[in-house]
Image (tube, helix red, strand yellow):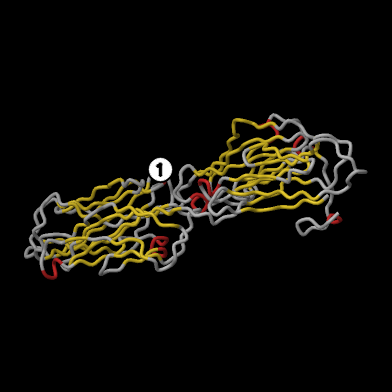
Amino acid sequence: MEKLNGIHPNKQVMSFTFMMFLSRVWSEPIHYSVSEETEGGAFVAHLTKDLGLGTGELAARSAQVVFDDDKQYLLLDPQTGDLFLREKLDREELCGPADPCVLHFQVFLEMPVQFFQGELWVQDINDHSPMFPAEEVLLKIPENSQPGTVFPLKLAEDLDVGSNGLQKYTISPNSHFHVLTRNHSEGKKFPDLVQDKPLDREEQAEYSLTLTALDGGSPPRSGTVRVQILIMDVNDNAPEFVHTPYKVQVLENCSLNSPIFSVLARDMDAGNFGSVSYGLFQPSDEIEQTFSMNAVTGEIQLQKKLDFEKIKSYHVEIEATDGGGLSGKGTVVIEVVDVNDNAPELTITSLSSSIPENASETIVSIFKIRDRDSGDNGKTTCSIPDNLPFILKQTFKNFYTLVTEGPLDRETRAEYNITITVTDLGTPRLKTQYTYYF
């Protein structure tokens, strides 16, 4: 027997012969919950009891816990049936802003083949405070600004979610301004400074306020930034973008330094007050690393490779500022278009190194396939050569079994080479092959 996947058969501890049984799938997933930052080794659940299995059945049937992302967050003691947390989990690292944070897994048993679906919910704790991107914000307001005028301020970021996330803003008491908390379409909360009274630069040319961001934890956490307001001589008009939000689609294999899109803002003032410069408005680290903006032309360029499988769209906030310090805000929605840049992946879950010649419908191998692309680029077909006494069966989601079509005759043929081919439906089509020798 030839070498398989870099491991010589003599080094295999044991081989398994799987008789073909009707696979069974537990339709309703089992749910487990654990708080982030819980120490590794913590008890999660008694799996044997939850699955309604007998004592020792998990060990006898070679139970495995397989997560969708191929990482191992839980440890299973097959003798006791206890599930333990493998290591401390960070909800923000695992799921980012997504809420709830759910890690999907399957419990796989052999003889007979059986699957149970499971979900591990990672609960958020209030371990982050709201943070502003700078210690001070400079805001220039013309003295002829009218009561009721709204001035958008830079938002604070809180990595926690739900009630532990940022809930509202407050500002130090002042007779001329108050702050409103505005909900963004993406779920973020922005502070708006609202003018309450007329301004007179000759009476007071500067205001210094403290803006506070509060989350909803118990006790709540907070972050502050100083808002420095300068009252400016009259500049009647702020720049306005011609169209906002802008929407553009970009292929994920777009080359670096390529122009993505150009925006245009107009200012009705003349001279320096009417000249406009462009820039990204409070960009996140990801957006600042991925895009740049020409201050003169308003052209957005790509400076980091796109990956549809990681980020499917970007909401880029932009700003146009005139020579008098007034600014207008806009949004560019950049949608990343998937290209077929990922070949299908095939992972062997179980493998038999020998088959009795008189056995019928014997399971030779159990494997999982996936393709990280989307749409037709991520759809796959799985096949083996037609001239072999074997068939493929899809048993559960993306799991397949390679099964003998009937009894084999060793005297007629003692060895087989079986090539499994997985092909996606993208353009161009990509494929992965795995050859099994026994």
Quadrant housing residue 60: top right
State the image coordinates of residue 404 (x, y, percent, origin top left): 79, 39
Q: Amino acid at mark 1?
A: Ser
Provide residue 116's location: percent of width, then percent of height.
65, 35
- Quickly name the residue at label 1: 163
Q: Position of residue 54 (x, y in %)?
A: 75, 30
Asked whether 180 or 305 is in front, the reply is 305
The residue located at (61%, 42%) in the rendering is 105
So how many labels did they put on this image? 1
Point out the image quarter for the N terminus: bottom right
In the foreground, 84 or 372:
372
Give the percent coordinates (x, y) of residue 400: 69, 41
123 vs 190, left or right, is right
Name the residue nearer the viewer: 85 or 119: 119
| Neighbours of disc 1 within 10 Å: few (<14), some (14-19), many (20+) | some
Position of 149 compared to 310: left or right? left
In-image side of 144 versus 31 (left or right) = left
Residue at 49 percent across and 52 percent down: it is 92
Find residue 287 and report its image quarter: bottom left
Q: Secondary structure at mark 1?
A: helix
Vertical comparison of 426 with 45: above or below: below
**Image: 114 above or below 296:** above
The residue most toward the right is: 411
